[in-house]
Image: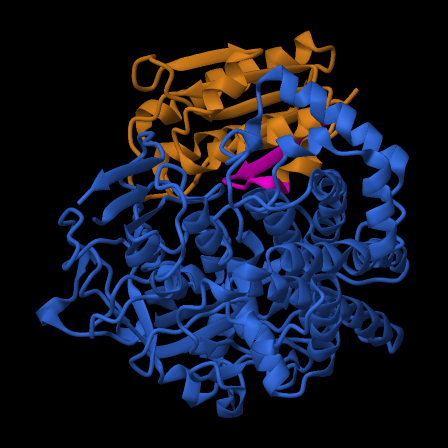
Amino acid sequence: MATRITIDPITRIEGHLRIDVEVENGKVNKSWSSGQMWRGVEQILLGRDPRDAWAITQRICGVCTTVHAITSVRSIENALDLEVPLNAQYIRNMIMTAHALHDHIVHFYHLSALDWVDVVSALKADPAKTAQLAESLSDWDGNSRHVFEDVQTRLKTFVGSGQLGPFANGYWGHPAMKLTPEVNLLAVSHYLQALEVQRYCSKIVATLGSKSPHIQNMAVGGVSNPIATDSQSVLTVERLLLVKEMIDKLGSFIRNCYLVDVSAIGAFYADWTAYGQGITDYLSIPDVPMDTKNTQFMMPGGYIKGGDLATYKPIAGGHDPYFREGVAESVKHSWYNYSNGAGALHPWKGETTPNYTDFQDDGKYSWVKSPTFYGKPAQVGPLANVLCGVASGHQPTIKYLTTVVDTVSQLAGTKIPLTALHSTIGRHAARAVRSGVIYENLQGNWQALMENIAKGDTKTFNRPTFPKGEIMGVGVHEAPRGVLSHWSVIKDGKIANYQCVVPTTWNAAPRNEDDQIGPYEAALLGTPVADPERPLEVLRTVHSFDPCLACAVHLTDVETKTVVQVKAL
Amino acid sequence: MRVVVLGIGNTLMSDEGFGVHAIEALEKRYEMAEGVEVVDGGTTGMELFPELQGADHLVVVDAVRAGQPEGGIVRLTGDDVPAFFKTKLSPHQIGLSDILAALRFAGSSPQSIVLIGVKPVSLDLCMELTPQVAACIDPVVVMVADELTALGVAPRLRA
């Protein structure tokens, strides 16, 4: 007999994602991913000045503010063929990479670790043994017995208070929780330390972006930061030296904690390398531009078919026709209609006309559109980014990946192959690997900015001029959750069309024009479910993508609905 | 002493953005005393942790449904505030309740929390407030200024 499980909402952060699975013989054999909110930023932008779009798109999502700001200005600059001064590129790159590190650290320690870490079990740990274990893994100075004792005491008070907050929905004592109390205590301690560390990211963003969490310094044509070596009110060398201090602290945490913790969890949950593979066509876009024309990048991107790295085809950037012509969105299974019953549409021709029907298993069931790359669904995100890095011989990616794979192999006592990455746990590993790479990008851009200023270049802005007639552009960004693109059509200096194709749209996509299932849906097939009332395994796989729905979907339902419904079929 | 005035909400959804519009109006009318920070939180989540950490007192302005009539103003304090944010009226509020709990776990909860809010009339997609809710901006700005005065950090009217 099959059981139908509905989990709604599934995320701990932004947005309303609903997941339905049918479980037969203890495994998922059918799945649906459905966005339960409607996003309408596209309509708000129509007729507006393209120079204002970034400040508006920054409000689409509370998690990805800077991400949409930067992608929006890139889209308009692309339409205008406007170069971006080097200083502006470096400053944007630093904001972008600091934000990405914040996002990855928070996702691992504060949003998804609770799927793997049994917080309550940490109360039973022996802090001395935790310290022994931790010291064998890294020489992080936050790993002393004293620290672990202190955390355990705090945890006792916190759990005793009965108000568990972020821990309230945890599946404590679930049979799929496999860590020893000592490892759980280690993870809870790093949870607290990561709260401190994420502040460095926010400070970097606030220093460079004038304010955080909503940056103020973006502009079509560059950034509005004046640079001077001697003034108090602007970006000074002194402030940049403070930024450097924070970059170094982040680097230390990523090397000594994040990469190590991911490896430890990967080793204890090695069985999870066999689940959650799903779609192995991977799409990623090059980013961290180091020239004014967006043609040279620190981070590569491209397309991989069927998980085979030999098929890797690089993408040269947002201007590459191979990327621009490959993207389309279907609404066959989404709550929209295209005029004249059109099939999948290219984003420049994209339409956003709602047509809500109710949840239809074989018909329309989501506010998320279904994007495809040359007609096929694609998985995006850190895993796609890392695999493209490996395929293209990108040394920093290979270096950090080798570190993680070696550590996991050593802890698990068996050689872990690269193919293990195509999995639920693989997506977490890839996010940590990417964090190592991004940290180096952040450092590299700090260096480049200092050197460029030392040369006497203080330019940060090229003034845009808008022609009569119609122009089109696309801004791209390899965001924390994967490929983000903003497609703009500008007519006589006003926005005539604007479509955001966001990472979670790719991954949370419903069935497409050819009824092929999307990446979340595919990844869930075959996932074991021990207890349908507590479907922790389903959450693990979906959370491994770092879902963030606020911008993927277009709010209908603001009422509270919780959480798991189980129905025998 | 550090006091944070936090405006939250989604400015793309009409009255949902009330909190953000209200703190903008607050800063336009008043100059803050030393130690008072005004934060536009939008719909952010964990990004607010560093902003709130180390705050002795927190004043939150938001769109709030707490049984009052549409366009009605409400003031909640103490334990009612985190309890309110658990009811999840909109997605970002899940974030704030989690951050308050994380602050407690990290040992840096504010001593006091006050929530001032207005019940939204419309959550339609547009960047403007409805006239009914827009009319609440002035009284709410005065209420926030009174809270600050009561905390001993009265703001000064700008010339």
Asked whether residue B159 is in view, the answer is no
Does the magenta run of residues contain B46? yes
Which residue lies at the image location 25% right of the left edge and 46% below the top edge? A4
Look at chain A in the picture and name its colour: blue
Q: Is residue B103 placed above or below A275 in the rendered structure? A: above
Front in this rendered view, residue A520 or A194: A520
Picture quadrant where residue B73 is located: top left
Q: Is residue B55 placed above or below A6 in the rendered structure? A: above
Which residue lies at the image location 65% right of the left edge and 85% below the top edge? A296
Which residue lies at the image location 68% right of the left edge and 83% below the top edge? A394
Front in this rendered view, residue A2 or A374: A2
Quadrant where the C terminus of chain A is found in the figure: top left
Q: Is residue A374 placed above or below A514 in the rendered structure? A: below
Left or right placement of residue A154 versus residue B140 in this view: right
Q: Is residue A286 placed above or below A382 in the rendered structure? A: below
Picture quadrant where residue B37 is located: top right
- Which residue ends up furthest to the left in the rendered image? A340
Which residue lies at the image location 65% right of the left edge and 33% below the top edge? A121
Front in this rendered view, residue A278 or B86: A278
Residue A419 in picture, x, y percent from top left: 55, 76
Q: Tell me the orange chain.
A: B
Asked whether residue A413 is in view, the answer is yes
Point out the stretch of residues depicted in magenta: B34-47
Residue A62 in picture, x, y percent from top left: 51, 45
